[in-house]
Amino acid sequence: MLSPKIEKALNEQVLLEAESSQIYLAMASWAEVEGFSGVAAFLFQHSDEERLHMLKLLKFVNERGGHGTVPALKAPSLKYKGVKELFQQVLDHEILVSTEINKLVDICLKEKDYTTHNFLQWYVSEQIEEEALARLILDKLKMIGADKSGMYFFDRDIATMGAAEKAPAEKK
Ligand code: OFO
């Protein structure tokens, strides 16, 4: 059984994962309109993954006797300055999510809820992967700079990057 404090904290994380999905969906749509079809494919997939993260949390709350709540979402930004700026925002957002996951883990330890603590370890590993992937992408973009043909190949290759960079056991 979840304590009210942990249930509230988990539902706040449901909101953050849903917002992540929404933000990446908006980014994907922008990239598609701008002609970056590979970047769009990567971000559409990333948005779907975040929705699964949200669902996994919501179902866990219900399984443990709480009520996983479906939150209202703010409209994300519709415009981005460019692909590099967009991925900087992805990295910043993932760092924020990692911070919130760490806070949740800390609450579980303080409340002695070892079941939820154990459940959250999946999210801890996932955030390490996602931050590393966003950093890798940003490094590539910094290398490419203003080179148009470099950008062409980047857009072609990134379409499959999300799945390829994750170890088989970690794919969802
Ligand atoms: Fe849910 O993994 Fe990123 O935010």
Image (cartoon, helix red, strand yellow):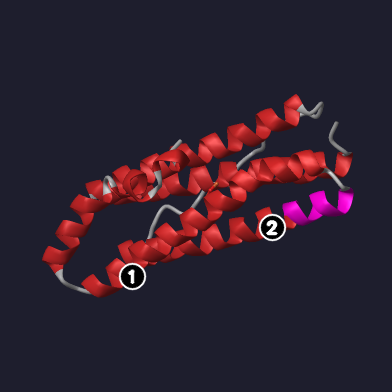
User: Where's residue 28, x and y in %?
Assistant: 36, 46
Q: Count residues near mark 1 (Cα–Cα under 10 Å), then give few for <14, some for 14-19, many for 20+.
A: few
Amino acid type, mark 1: Asp
Foreground residue among 109 and 41: 109
In the image, is residue 56 above or below residue 158?
A: above
The 10 Å Cα crowd at callout 2, few under 14, some 14 to 19, many 20 or more, is some
At label 2, which amino acid type do we have? Asn
| Residue depicted at x 81% and y 26% | 65
**From the viewer's perspective, is 93 left or right of 5?**
left
- Residue 85 among those drawn in magenta: no
Instruction: Pick whichever of labels 2 and 1 is earlier in the sequence.
Output: 2
Describe the element under mark 1 as helix, strand or loop.
Answer: helix
On whether ligand 1 comes within 8 Å of the CB at mark 2, the answer is no
Q: Quarter-wise, where is residue 47 in the image?
A: top left
In the rendered view, tell whether residue 131 sits above or below residue 167: below
Classify residue 164 as left or right of residue 128.
left
Q: Position of residue 71 (x, y in %)?
A: 67, 37
Residue 112 lies, in percent from the top left, at 87, 47
Residue position marked by numbered label 2 in the rendering: 102
Residue extending furthest toward the left: 149
Residue 85 versus residue 10 in the image, above or below: below
- Going 61% across and 52% down the picture, which residue do you hit? 124
Read off the magenta span.
104-111
- The answer to whether one can see residue 131 in this image is yes
Marks 2 and 1 close (CB-CB < 8 Å) = no
Task: Check disc 2 and report its element: helix, strand or loop.
Answer: helix
Res 1 label: none
Residue found at x 60% / y 61%: 96
Left or right of 117? Residue 92 is: left
Q: Which residue is mark 1?
A: 139
User: Which residue: 50% across, 43% down?
Assistant: 21
Q: Is residue 52 above or below residue 125?
A: above
